[in-house]
Image (cartoon, rainbow, N blue to C red):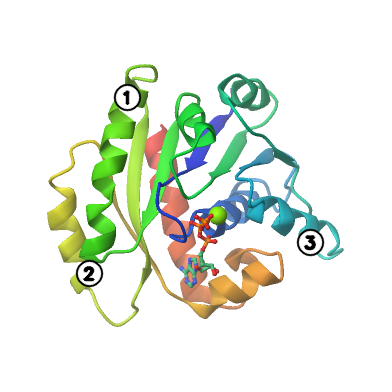
Amino acid sequence: MGKIILLGHQKGGVGKSNTAVNLAVAIAKEQFKGETDRILLIDADPQATLYRWSQRRDENNEVNSFPCIRLDGNITAQVKREAEKYDYVIIDAAGRDSREMRSAMLACNIMLMPTKASRADLELLEHMAETVETARDYNSNLNVSVFINMAPTNSQAEKLIAKKLLAEFPEFKLMNTVISERKAHRDSFSEAVGVHEWKDNKAKAEVSCLLKEMCDELI
Ligand SMILES: Nc1ncnc2c1ncn2[C@@H]1O[C@H](COP(=O)(O)OP(=O)(O)OP(=O)(O)O)[C@@H](O)[C@H]1O
Ligand SMILES: [Mg+2]
């Protein structure tokens, strides 16, 4: 049975789709010598950001394509079925409370929640805490790990604020990895590649850290 990773948050624009593609590429590069066929991408967002990234990638002969499907509605059973065929299943959900996000929470091993580190963003986690508690009634092992995304490269202050605020939420684990705001993320995404296939080693190192920390959580 493969590992099921959900990128989820009720807030839009926090970097769920961006993280989904970067983790997929990082796993392919670091664990499967660049082979992509052991990793399934599931786009569970009607916006289809992930699916369109994957379609653009199919047209690029210099990189391997990822298997990618779109699902909607209650996706719990199908996600579990897909996980029997792959080593990793990465699900990208919409940036709102959706049936897809909630049903994916019942199937996944880990939910990664990117967040910006401002107080206004962190306060929104309260809504998610309730959703997570409900999901744990059905998926008691659900690991929910929050990480700071789009952090300014010149300041550590945000992480300290986040640590303090997140201490109020025992439902979540705050990951050590911080992903900085870097142009490489936007540029690589628009070329339908990941930062592991781009030319910014700092961006790549941060995604490697995120992957390692996630894999440690999955053991
Ligand atoms: N670390 C980063 N550095 C720079 N830009 C980033 C980073 N992470 C995400 N972005 C950019 O921020 C925007 C939002 O990211 P993304 O689409 O991944 O968010 P999302 O949570 O999937 O949004 P939605 O809720 O609409 O699905 C995109 O333009 C993306 O390129
Ligand atoms: Mg998205």
Q: Rounded to the nearest whole Å, what is the CA distance between mark 2 and mark 3?
A: 35 Å
Residue 122 location in percent, x, y? 25, 56
Q: Which residue is mark 1?
A: 134
The answer to which quarter of the image holds residue 152 is: bottom left
Residue in front for this viewpoint, 42 or 131: 131
Please name the residue shown 28% across and 28% down the image.
133
Residue in front for this viewpoint, 154 or 92: 92
Please name the residue shown 71% across and 64% down the image.
192
Crowdedness of circle 2 by 10 Å Cα count: few (<14), some, many (20+)? some
Q: Amino acid at mark 3?
A: Arg
Is residue 50 rendered to the left or right of residue 18? right
Camera sees residue 27: yes
Q: Amino acid at mark 2?
A: Glu
**In terms of sequence position, does the residue under pointer 1 or pointer 3 come before the other?**
3
**Could you say whether the residue bearing mark 2 is in a helix, strand or loop?**
helix
Q: Rounded to the nearest whole Å, what is the CA distance between mark 1 and mark 3?
A: 37 Å
Return the mark for residue 89. none
Image quadrant holding the C terminus, namely top left
Return the mark for residue 158. 2
- Do the numbered discs 1 and 2 sit on residues whose CB atoms are within 8 Å? no
Please state the quadrant of the image where ligand 2 appears.
Answer: bottom right
**In terms of sequence position, does the residue under pointer 2 or pointer 3 come before the other?**
3
Q: Rounded to the nearest whole Å, what is the CA distance between mark 1 and mark 2?
A: 29 Å
**Within 8 Å of ligand 1, the CB of disc 1?**
no
Give the label, 1 or 3, closer to the camera: 1
- Do the numbered discs 1 and 3 sit on residues whose CB atoms are within 8 Å? no
Camera sees residue 198: no
Q: Which residue is mark 3?
A: 56
Is 180 situated above or below 40?
A: below
